[in-house]
Amino acid sequence: MNADRTPAYPLRLSVTARPLVFGGHAIARRLGKAGLPDWSIAETWECSDVDGSVSAVTDGPLAGRSLRRVVADHPRELMGPGWSGSRFPLLTKFIDASGALPVHLHADDESARRLEGSPNGKTEAWHILDAAVGATALCGVKAGVTGDLLRAALEAQEFDSVLRRLPVRAGETLYVPGGTPHSFGPDTLVYEIEQTSDIQQHAMRWNMEDGSPVGDAEFHCHLDMLMQQVDLETRPDFTPGLSIAVGDGVERVFLCAGPYFALERWRAGTAEPLRHSFATAQILSNVGAPVRVRTGTWSGELGRAETLLLPAACAEVEIAGPADVLFGYLPDLDRDVRAPLQAAGCSLPLIASLGPGTDPGTRGAGAAGRKT
């Protein structure tokens, strides 16, 4: 990249595997991700700048450098013009909810700064890769439930009395604003994109790390903090996204988009390759068979459930089909989302979920970074 004449090229990153109690073996056995340990895995952090789990570049001229160092040394080359921030703004994961996740929430930006001492909160989105027939998720507080009723139900662990239970189907996506209590699983396989953060407040009487019991004092302390951060009004729903054709047998699906991130799924057959131009860093994750990726003079294979970070300086990528891949990025909503959808003749509903509602695109992107 420009600062030290290092060429722009896709960055392969180290992956953090987390053995939480709700996990299993689906990321390896169903997605085909290689190199994982034999024990039960709940999450693989594919691209992370979270303290304690910062990804490192594993090959090429930048090998050995942390993602945070790359951000500091090459902000324009990595993120494109108009961005500022000290950390890479996005965290992506594969999540195996062989068991149910704990009921929990993540603070929004304001609560994170005020209550957690964190520069930003954590809004996230789940893209469902696979789910058993009848799978469900909890997300949001039922209409009419007061704070007192919510607190009493959480103390009694009676979640269905106060939280919305939604059907889960492969291919759909749920945009979850900070402050929304939620859980999903069992028998659900998810790709998650979110703000760079690991803050959370749980409503369970067990620890997700090892299943050990949570004592009364700690449990009530967690509930105290959760109730200060909860948003009683957010009730998001799953959506299929908006699909446009961009070539012969090439489909581009906008799964979700908002001020913090956008996520797209592209599929291509063999008539012509997938070609994508971009002006900001792209997290490219493969959810299909191995593919051949080309950008500039660089060419390489992206295996099953593997991820590449494409710097903005790469500008474009070509992927030979058959291909089924995800692109996650920090968007300029007008340039990256509204313009291509309008050009394809799509109406523009709620940008955050690509479903009915009110466009939140004027909200700030938080301290993790911004595009102007």
Image (tube, rainbow, N blue to C red):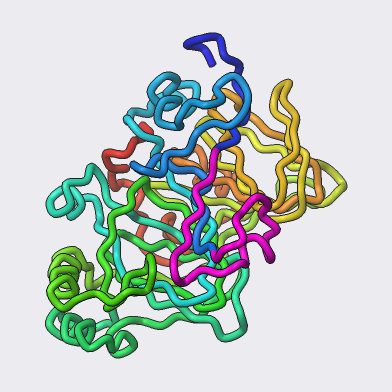
Q: Count every numbered label the image shows and give the total.
A: 0
Given residues 339 and 304, the one toward you in this image is 304
Residue 310's x, y, as percent?
Answer: 58, 33
Whether residue 188 is visible here, answered yes or no, is: yes
Assign the magenta stretch its main secondary structure. loop
Whether residue 333 is visible here, answered yes or no, is: no
Q: Is residue 307 magenta?
A: no
Q: Residue at x 82, y 52 (%)?
A: 269
Q: Residue at x 40, y 30 (%)?
A: 68
Residue 82's x, y, as percent?
Answer: 38, 26
Assign the C terminus to one quadrant of the image: top left
Q: Residue at x 44, y 65 (%)?
A: 20
Given residues 312 and 155, the one toward you in this image is 155
Q: Is residue 17 magenta?
A: yes
Residue 170's x, y, as percent?
Answer: 61, 71
Residue 69's x, y, as percent?
Answer: 41, 25
In the rendered structure, which segment of residues is drawn in magenta?
14-40
Compared across the picture, whether 301 is left or right of 352 comes to right
Assign the N terminus to one quadrant of the image: top right
Given residues 225 and 51, the one toward you in this image is 51
**Is the residue 2 above or below the residue 167 in the image?**
above
The quarter of the displayed image where residue 178 is located: bottom left
Compared across the picture, whether 303 is left or right of 359 comes to right
Q: Residue at x 66, y 54 (%)?
A: 33
